[in-house]
Each structure stands twice: as C-alpha cells, then as structure tokens.
Image (tube, rainbow, N blue to C red):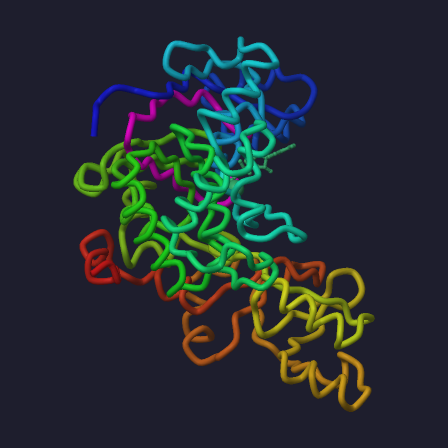
Amino acid sequence: MANDSILRVEHVSKLYGPNKSEAMQLLSQGMHKDEVKQKTGVTTALWDVTCDVKRGEILAIIGLSGSGKSTLVRCLNLLHRPTTGEIWFEDSNIGELGKKELLDYRRRKISMVFQNFGLMNHRSVMGNVAFGLEIRGVPTIEREKKAMEMIEMVGLKGWESQPVTSLSGGMRQRVGLARALTNDPEILLMDEAFSALDPLVRSNMQFELMRIQSQLNKTIVFITHDMDEAFKLGDRVAIMQDGRLIQIDTPEQMSAHPANEYVRQFIGSADRAKVMRAQNIMVTPDCVVHLSEGPQHAIQEMRRAGVSSAFVLGPKMTLAGLLTVDGAIAGIREKATIADKMLTGLPTTTPDALVSDILPLAAETRFPISVIDSNGTFVGLVTKASVLSCFVDSPDSVEKNGEAS
Ligand SMILES: Nc1ncnc2c1ncn2[C@@H]1O[C@H](COP(=O)(O)OP(=O)(O)O)[C@@H](O)[C@H]1O
Ligand SMILES: [Mg+2]
C-alpha cells in the first residue's frame, strides 16, 4: 500500500437548519450536538472532520447510527456539499469543480455501492453492470467485454443474461459491486453495503471484497456499524461519534491505544453489548407487505427481495405478523387473506433496549426480533447474529470468525 493520500478531508462540517453561524460558534466551544440542536434548532451531521484516505487502502468508517458516516461519504462525491471545509481529490478541490468536471469525477474516479443495491429491475445482470459505460457512450461490444470481466470477478459468471429480480440478496449485492467496478473508478464508496445481508453471505462478501481489492488495488471507503467487519476489512479504521471523528488508526493501534474511553468501550468485546442498543444494530427488513394486500402480491415481493418470508404491517406502520412463502402459497390455494395465514406473537423489543438485555430473547427465538418504538411503529429488525456478534471478542477473534480460508 502506497502511503500517499488520494483524498483529503479538511475541517469539513455539515449542518442542517437556519442559524448555522450561531450553531457553529457553540460547536467550536465544544458543545454537544444535542444541546446545539436544542438551543439553535440546527442539526449537526458532521463537525470539523479532518482525515485522509490513502491510495490503495480500505478505510473502514464505523460509528453508531446517526454519527455522521453516510454524510461523510456523501461529501466525498459531493452528493452532499459540506457547509464548511474542503475536500481534495489528488490536486483538485472538488468543491471548485465545474458541473462537467464533477460529473466526470463521479463517473470515472469515485463510484458508490449502496446498501439497497439500487439496481434496475427491468434489466438483466449485464444490463445493470454495463450501465455506467452505456451512459458514457462506450460501444456495446467494448462495454459488455469490460462488464463481463467484472461479472466474473464477483463470481456471477453464467448469470449475465438473467433478470436481476431472479437473484438472491447476496447475488444482487455482487451485481451492485460489479457495476461500480465496471466504471473502473479509483475509489469505491460502500455505505453499509453488506449490512442487509445474512451473516454467512455477508462473510463471503467480505472475503470477496478483500480478494477483489488485492487484485484490482482500488481505494475503498467502507462504512459499517459492525466493529468486527471494520476490523476485518479495514487497513485503517475511523471511528465517528456524534458527527465528530474521534480516532483514525490501524486496528492494531486502535486496540492498543484507544483515543478515549468511548473508543475503548466500542472496541472492547464484552463492553460492546453494554453500549450498543437495539437501534444501533437494527437493520431494515428486506421484505415488507401490507395487511391489506393479497398473498399473490406477497409472493412477488418475496421473490423480488430474494427471501422466503415477509413482515406484515398494519395501519400506521404497526407490526401485524410474519408471512412465510408457504403461508402465502396456502393462502392463494385456499383463497385466504394474509391475515389468515401470517404468524403472530413475534418477539419484539424497543429501540433503546441494551443489546446485553436482548441476548436471552435472541438466544431462544428462531425469528428476528422486531424493534417497535413508543408509538407502536415498526422501525427495524435485530437479528440473532448481530446480537451475538456484540459478544464476540475482537479483534483477536476476527481470524477465527472469518471463513476466509
Ligand atoms: N437531510 C438532512 N436533514 C437534517 N438532518 C439530517 C439530514 N441528513 C442527515 N441528518 C442528520 O445527520 C446526522 C448524521 O446522519 P448520517 O450521516 O445519516 O448518520 P449515519 O450514517 O452514521 O447513521 C443524523 O443526526 C441525521 O439525523
Ligand atoms: Mg448511514
């Protein structure tokens, strides 16, 4: 890994709301963003972040939900414009790029892989992967050749003419990755790209990403809220808290010399379950249907998401139950409704429940735990694997957990 910086982030802040100057004054005095919000109504997504990304490294950005990770990566390609501060790509201040130069930067230098894949369902695998080159006007033969290389690279050879709707979640994520790689960008931005995948598929994808990175030597900025994933993938790890960058270091250095108590707790194994709450580890369900819809629709939705069950929501986003694909098929056969066929009495918890307190429930249930807020709204899911992973020692156990053999 070369040691020069490909990106430099200099004193970047991102605030939302009127009256930013007063908020900035308070923030620079060290006031916490919650208090700033109360006093001024301004939301602080990022405050005074300075760091660099080195050419050829995987930089993992980690932090609890709402700590500013997505805002930071979206500043790197100017999907968000910083309120103050500068971002440099090599020798260019990207804030000063013209419209055309910015487009070029996004198409050629920096590509984003999203958590929800962002694929075009009416297109085949090839049609999705070659899309970036298509809009650049690259001739068909040439773009399909390049796309095919990347389809092979991510292990999807043989699937190129299939519709993306026929693929499982893990395979769709591979398509998303191949599509980003086909642009041959220097930098890949991955925002919780693997967070929605089930643990085994995720572990496989982590391994694949490391393999691809070592072959193609890309610079990767990888966001995660999972410390194991950060330590496994990251050459360096940046830890965010409440919009501030607390520490950026190699996993070894970070473990040996945590910058403060927060970092120590975050990486400390057993302690982690006592700082993490359900809202910090919850994920969005892959497949949701509404009580008023029919079983046929539910099956279509499950097929689209590549899963075998769907969460059923009632009025105002309340959780009604869980419908399995078998239940849905029986429903069609018997001309029954989703309500007749869904499972009810699912395990639930609240957003602020400590992970350590959810453990007993996670250990005994065979369903993901639904997170329900104080208004009765269904806000997400906590899986057994994500609860258990909070209890895994890291980073020493990372090698043992990896399937990368
Ligand atoms: N468009 C927006 N308007 C107001 N606040 C926002 C906006 N986007 C993000 N935020 C706030 O900024 C903070 C950081 O969000 P985000 O970068 O998405 O965090 P993370 O990715 O770490 O979960 C959160 O408090 C979020 O509510
Ligand atoms: Mg985010």
Left or right side of 255 for 116: right
The residue under the point 51% across, 57% down is 282
Pick whichever, 138 or 405, lies toward us. Answer: 138
The residue under the point 48% across, 79% down is 365
Q: Is residue 36 above or below residue 225?
A: above
* Magenta-colored span: 45-66
Left or right side of 133 for 389: left
Rendered location of residue 129, percent (x, y): 52, 44
Rendered location of residue 240, percent (x, y): 41, 35
Rendered location of residue 146, percent (x, y): 43, 39
Q: Is residue 231 above or below residue 30?
A: below
The residue under the point 30% across, 20% down is 5
Left or right side of 156 for 132: right
Pick whichever, 283 or 200, lies toward us. Answer: 200
Task: State yes or no: residue 83 in magenta.
Answer: no
Task: State yes or no: residue 64 in magenta.
Answer: yes
Rendered location of residue 335, percent (x, y): 82, 87
| Helix, strand or loop: magenta stretch | strand
Looking at the rendered image, the quarter that the N terminus falls into is top left
Pick whichever, 177 or 358, lies toward us. Answer: 177
Q: Is residue 248 above or below residue 365?
A: above
Total label count?
A: 0
